[in-house]
């Protein structure tokens, strides 16, 4: 089995002790910290901005941090997040008037570039952009809020994208975001995912972070 990565979405974390939450998740074995940045325009919710990333980097959080922009007017945000220490920027095709230009902007700073596809977003965007992408993120819920249930028809979409990536023979991480838990993560992995973004299943769980991540790893390790 190829290496599978676990990302923790801090949208579900306790923001009164965010640094502690992140450190505990990393100690438990989380590979990536995932920011869900929302502006109350692209989605009906308002979350965090670049200053949160700045604070984490200044307080010795050195792990990989991925920025998922669910916003309008993304280009200035792209630059700000990269300058403050983002490792990758993931954007939605609907959020940019000139999508190729925005992807190229990310790459011009030496940052990993990703494209996020909502449940109803067509895969046709990949025809023109896949050669520039490092990440394809599949939304398995409609964006905007934590704690939603995984949409079962997304398995087919994951399988389709995995076939596209394999055909291109290019190193692109296939990430899945939304409603992932211990009960469905194995099927998501079998469908072709590389990175599993978990939020509520980690931060809102009564079990310890160590126990949750250990159980997830055991599930993933059973996949041949």
Image (cartoon, helix red, strand yellow):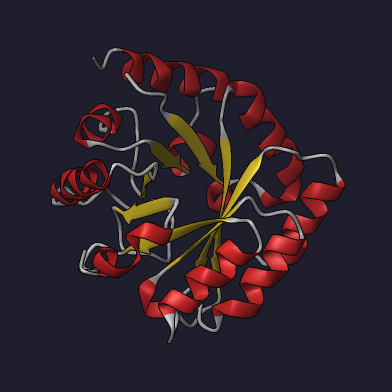
Residue in the foreground of this view, choosing between 211 and 34: 34
Q: Decide if residue 1 is in sight here.
A: yes
Quadrant assignment for the C terminus: top left
Judged from this view, the residue extending furthest toward the right is 58
Q: Is residue 74 left or right of residue 59?
A: left
Q: Position of residue 80 (x, y in %)?
A: 72, 69
Q: Classify the position of the N terminus by image quarter.
A: top left
Q: Name the residue located 74 percent from the left edge and 58 percent from the top edge.
A: 52
Query: Residue at coordinates 21% horizontally, 52% vertically from top-left?
Result: 151
Q: Nearer the viewer, residue 68 or 148?
A: 68
Residue sitting at x 46%, y 31%? 5
Looking at the picture, how far across and down is residue 128, in whole percent? 29, 69
Q: Residue 158 at x, y = what percent?
A: 22, 46
Residue 70 visible, this orientation: no
Residue 167 percent location from the top left of the image: 20, 44
Q: What is the count of numbered marks?
A: 0
Q: Residue at x 61, y 66 (%)?
A: 108
């Amino acid at each position: 089995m190829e290496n599978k990565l676990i990302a923790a979405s801090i949208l579900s974390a306790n923001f009164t002790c965010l640094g502690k939450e992140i450190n505990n998740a990393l100690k438990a074995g989380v590979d990536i910290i995932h920011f869900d940045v929302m502006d109350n325009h692209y989605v009906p919710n308002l979350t965090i901005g670049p200053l949160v990333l700045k604070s984490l980097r200044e307080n010795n959080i050195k792990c990989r941090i991925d920025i998922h922009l669910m916003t309008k007017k993304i280009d200035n945000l792209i630059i700000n997040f990269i300058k403050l220490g983002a490792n990758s920027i993931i954007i939605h095709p609907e959020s940019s008037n000139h999508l190729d230009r925005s992807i190229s902007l990310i790459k011009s700073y030496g940052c990993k570039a990703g494209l996020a596809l909502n449940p109803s977003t067509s895969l046709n965007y990949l025809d023109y952009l896949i050669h520039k992408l490092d990440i394809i993120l599949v939304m398995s819920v409609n964006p905007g809020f934590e704690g939603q249930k995984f949409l079962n028809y997304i398995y087919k979409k994951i399988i389709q994208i995995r076939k596209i990536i394999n055909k291109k023979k290019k190193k692109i991480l296939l990430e899945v975001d939304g409603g992932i838990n211990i009960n469905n993560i194995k099927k998501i992995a079998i469908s072709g995912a590389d990175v599993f973004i978990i939020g509520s299943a980690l931060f809102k769980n009564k079990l310890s972070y160590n126990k949750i991540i250990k159980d997830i790893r055991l599930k993933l390790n059973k996949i041949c």
